[in-house]
Image: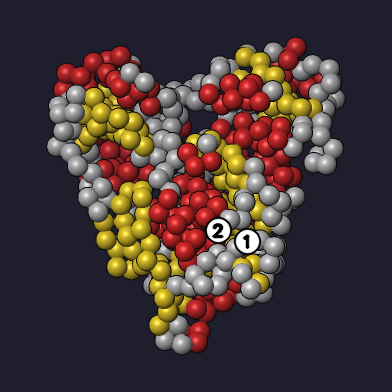
Amino acid sequence: MYQMDFNKPEHVHFIGIGGISMSGLAEILMDEGFTVSGSDAHPSELTEKLEHKGAAVFYGQRAENITDGIDVVVYTAAIHPDNPELAEARAKGLPILTRAELLGQMMRNYRYAIGIAGTHGKTTTTSMVAEILMAADTDPTVTVGGILNSIGGNIRLGGSEMFVAEACEYTNSFLSFYPNREIILNIEEDHLDFFKDIDDIRASFRRFAQIVPADGVVVISADIDRVGEIVEGLPCRVVTYGRSDDAQYRAENIEYDEYDRASFDAVWTEAADNDAEGGRGMEAGKSGAEGSGISSGGNKAETGAVGDNAVARLRIRLSVPGEHNIYNALAAIALCRTLSVGSEAIRRGLAGFTGTNRRFEKKGEVCGLTIIDDYAHHPQEIAATLSAAKHYPHKKLWCVFQPHTYTRTKAFLDQFAEALSAADEVILADIYAARETDTLGISSGDIAERIEALGTPAHYLGSFDEIEKFILENCVNGDLLITMGAGDIVKVGENLLGI
């Protein structure tokens, strides 16, 4: 594999530069003095931002975009082998890296490289970790799979100590990373166009955990099925969190406000805290971790008892809704404690996190109808989002769902119907095909039929124009409408709001 020398800037061309992760990596390289060019199908805010910074962006992918002077080409998993730019780069004998390989090489330049993985919750938890580390004045470099308002996008270029990255399992991308700190949030069936089954997915996460060196840490949910199989025999420290009584980090005294935002006690034993730091975290100086700016003194959680059985208790208030975010926050707390981050930074970081774009994001109101947008596209994500929405003020809860890929829709037909039936009424858009061309004989109408069979009214309307007209005719003042999916369903709410 071609190894980039980050002290010797060169010309890098990105095929698919408009992707949320690719654009972030391109921006990091530009800030480090690299020359960047790239291509994508259509202009977007991300590509326009890169152009403003000086990148040469081509719209439409053609062989002639691989110009003389390009030193290395980077491409995403969505790029097919017959892509004209990829074929031209190979014909010219240019070095070629996947997006994951480039990100992995970047990680090696940082003392603390943090990879955050899981079937769902990655973007939110990555953002929570970033907010805590920024509150602790550690100046992290961050790449996240969503737009985080506090950093003004999906990338933050910081100092040389910390790199925080969302780590996606699709096509085994995260196996190209080099983290010495990891979070594994959950392991569920998904991306079955690539993985054979749940056992194949579990094997991939096991390999991801094995990447961490002996002086590193894996933070993992104790609620994962047969979690011991994922971490058994690892040379590094393992820290657990979750609902399980066996978890080292747990949530107690949970309360919710009128918008389903939780307050809770994060609880852990001093033994777990000491194990997490035990000579493998940052060395604490008089005012914090030496050379890191992290404060571990003067910000301790309340404790009870003494010695290794002492219980640390830290009251946390979240600014994002839903029970699932309690456990995302616990994962972030456990990870940051392995870096000796103080209690006040943890509190401030989590309280200041108001969400990323497309994660229960309030888009606005029209004629008294509140419109929320959410990226949920897996049955468990849908269930979590609709559970949170139940506690949000409303008369009737409407969900406009756009399934993402035919493969996922076929695999989870019944699970989608069950999760969506938690809404008062459901509207189905056509399936967003993404990278797929074979319909597998599946349509959104199949989900609608199953939802109706469960007793919830469902309407398969297909086009956005039909959906928008239906909403205007049927939703009333005081209703709550959630546009949901990983495709472009967000446009429905934005069109209604005129934004």
**Left or right of 406 on screen, residue 471:** left
Residue at 28% from the left image edge and 38% from the top image edge: 420
Within the image, what quadrant is residue 216 found in? bottom right
- In the rendering, at what x and y percent does residue 352 appear? 42, 50
Q: Nearer the viewer, residue 188 or 473?
A: 473
Dot 2, crowdedness within 10 Å: few (<14), some or many (≥20)? many
Residue at 52% from the left image edge and 79% from the top image edge: 271
- In the rendering, at what x and y percent does residue 173 appear? 63, 42
Residue under label 1, please give it.
293
Residue under label 2, please give it.
136
Dot 1, crowdedness within 10 Å: few (<14), some or many (≥20)? some
**Which dot marks residue 1?**
none
Residue at 77% from the left image edge and 32% from the top image edge: 34
- In the rendering, at what x and y percent does residue 160 appear? 71, 51
- Under mark 2, the amino acid is Ala
The answer to whether residue 187 of the structure is visible from this angle is no
Tell me whether circle 1 and circle 2 mark residues in contact (CB < 8 Å). Answer: yes
Q: Nearer the viewer, residue 386 or 25?
A: 25
- Secondary structure beneath disc 2? loop
- Under mark 1, the amino acid is Gly
- In the rendering, at what x and y percent does residue 484 appear? 35, 33
